[in-house]
Image (cartoon, grey):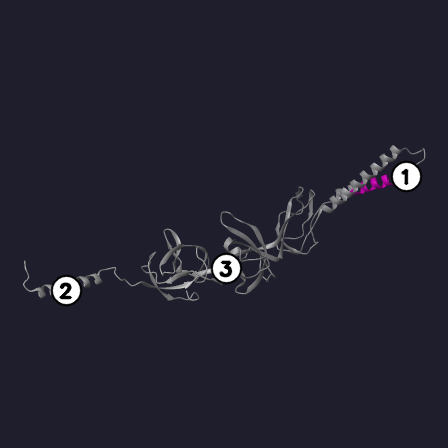
Amino acid sequence: MIFRYPFLLLLLLALLGGCGSSQEEKSPGRNKPALIVESTTAALMETHRTIERNATLHPLRSVNLSLQQEGVLLSLPFHEGAQVEKGAVLAKLDDTLLRAQLKKAEAQRSQAELELKRLKQLKGSSVVAENELARTTTSFNIARAEEEELTIRLKQSTLLAPFSGVIGDRLAEPGDTLPRLYHLLTLIDTSNLITTLRISELEMSGLSKGDEVGLTIDALGTPRFKGTIQRIHPMVDERSRQGTVEILLQSTPRGAMPGQLCRVELTLRSGERMLVPYNALRRDSRGEFVFVINSENRLERRSVISGLYFGERVEIMEGLSVGEQFVTRGFLGLGEGMSVTLRGGDLSRP
């Protein structure tokens, strides 16, 4: 086909070229604008964290008392709840036989002592032989040892309070015939109360012996009392990953008793930690991650390990370095490798 009008052909080609250019500009995916995100820079921050745990009050000292001798119980004057002072007589056995045996031992020791003294005065003469002096010396030593043994047994037939406290259990009555080391009484020191807590290994690193803590006792209402960390056990349970902390009440309030529920407020030691806003930490089937922004403003999925929570922030223990920039808002539609436009964020306002 031969065109008789060349200018019409040029006009047609120009129109077709214009249409193709317009379609190319409107094709999906071409010159798509980058998503706008808010970001901030990873940095170490001073932390201050308070936790609360429920616990139970216990006496600092609680001992089961028994007599080291057997016999008939003659006296047991105190009952449960009685306040006793250190050195008070708590129990006494019938010691009539022991006293008689002690008198006999004293007489035998005295006789042996006199005989030994007489032989020593005659020592060196032909009247006294060395073997006779040796036998008398041995007899005196045995008599003295028997006297000392009976003196100790007589002393052990009486039970004295080892410290001031309150009688907890009373497990016998006067007239009972008791075997040796029978558990008679429980003595509790209620002037010093402690509580024991199980704390996560992540939290124990923020505590030290001597730290002051706050306590409230439900039975006593709202007053807040002071306590001190007395001991931190050196082992962490390998199953629960928890350790044991003992806390001593600085002064025992009136009405506080062993067995009561208390609430302990612990302030973890301040220290520098890497914190990120809670909403910057993402999770999927592969675990926890954040979107790091590289120098070309492209996203990188960075796997991290989180730690403790501090209000609206969470600690990052591994995976993120100081100075790296990461996304804090604008996650809708984000994916690894995407290009983003930054809008400055502030870590103090997650």
**Mark 3 or mark 1: which comes first in sequence?**
3
Image coordinates of residue 105 in percent, x first then y, are 80, 41
Q: Are marks 3 and 1 in contact (CB under 8 Å)?
A: no
* SS at mark 3 in the image: strand
Seen in the image, is 86 located left or right of residue 316?
A: right
Q: Is residue 113 magenta?
A: yes
The disc at residue 135 is none
How far from the left and from the top, in percent, is residue 166? 63, 55
Q: Quadrant of residue 135?
A: top right
Between residues 244 and 101, which one lies in front from this camera angle? 244
Question: Under tag 1, what secondary structure?
Answer: helix
For label 2, the SS is helix
From the image, tell me which residue sits under label 1: 120
Please, what is the dominant secondary structure of the magenta stretch?
helix
Residue 229's image quarter? bottom right
Indicate which disc, 2 or 1, sits on the residue closer to the N terminus. Answer: 2
Q: Earlier in the sequence, mark 2 or mark 3?
A: 2
Q: Is residue 344 left or right of residue 107?
A: left
Pinpoint residue 146: horizontal percent, then vertical percent.
78, 40
| Residue at image location 40% in from the left, 55% down from the top | 302
- Alpha carbon separation for disc pair 2 and 1: 148 Å
Q: Amino acid at mark 3?
A: Glu
Q: CA distance from mark 3 to mark 1?
A: 78 Å
Q: Which one is closest to the eye, mark 2 or mark 3?
A: 2
Q: Residues within 10 Å of mark 3 (few under 14, many from 20)?
A: few
Give the label on residue 14, or none.
2
Q: Is residue 97 magenta?
A: no
What's under tag 1, amino acid-wise? Lys
Question: Is 125 left or right of 137, judged from the image as shown?
Answer: right
- Image position of 205 (left or right of 61): left
Q: Which residue is mark 3?
A: 52
